[in-house]
Amino acid sequence: MELSTGHEVADALGLLLRRSTRANLYADLTEGLGPAVDDVTYPVLSGLARTGPCSAADLAGEIGLDRSGVSRRASRLEEAGLVRREPDPEDRRAVLLALTDAGSDCVRELRERLAARLEAALAQWPADEARIFARGLRRFVEDGPFTEA
């Protein structure tokens, strides 16, 4: 029996989103970037690059961890000079996490590595199919069932 398109996409997303798949990818991408940058801290760096300065609680919701997990990972990154804590201008009692310049440089390197890895994988495809896939994936992410209200 042939799977419907929805089932096919759901199965593919399930494989893509598995923790082990992400951990292996993050470990490859972070190799050689220093002891603080690994598959555990990658989501904090990536999340801060997307959100800009934010509280540990807000970042936790963004990256799917609890606040204490974010704080522990942020502390490792802070010790390495990649993240800083700064006062929240709207609430002086609160603290925001932010990327340092070195943290932003690290994220740029991680994104370049990810793009190169994807380019290499898509190089096996006919160019028009790769472009159609990229446009379709962008559309699915922007207009699909995961769009935030």
Image: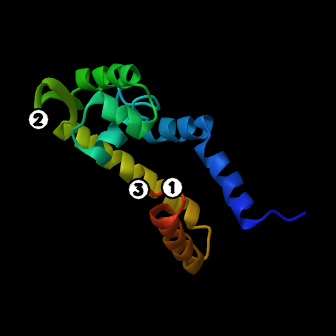
On residue 104, the disc is none
Looking at the image, which is closer to me, 22 or 63?
A: 63
Identify the element where label 3 is drawn. loop
Quarter of the image for residue 79 reads top left
Q: Residue at x 56, y 67 (%)?
A: 123
Q: Residue at x 46, y 58 (%)?
A: 147
Number of marks in the rendered image: 3
The tag on residue 146 is 1
Q: In the rendered structure, which amino acid carries the disc numbered 1?
A: Phe
Q: Is residue 128 above or below residue 98?
A: below
Q: Residue at x 59, y 76 (%)?
A: 129
Left or right of 120 in this view: 37: left
Circle 1: element type: loop
Residue corresponding to mark 2: 90
Q: Disc 3 residue type?
A: Ala
**Quadrant assignment for the N terminus:** bottom right
Q: Position of residue 146 (x, y in %)?
A: 51, 55
Q: Which residue is mark 3?
A: 149
> In the picture, which quadrant includes the C terminus?
bottom left
- Asked if residue 2 lies left or right of residue 63, the reply is right
The one nearer the camera, 114 or 12, is 12
- What's the CA distance linking mark 2 and mark 1? 30 Å
User: For the residues marked 3 and 1, what is the alpha-carbon distance in whole angstroms?
Assistant: 9 Å
Closer to the N terminus: mark 3 or mark 2?
2
Q: Going from the N terminus, do you reach mark 2 or mark 1 first?
A: 2
Snapshot quadrant of residue 82: top left
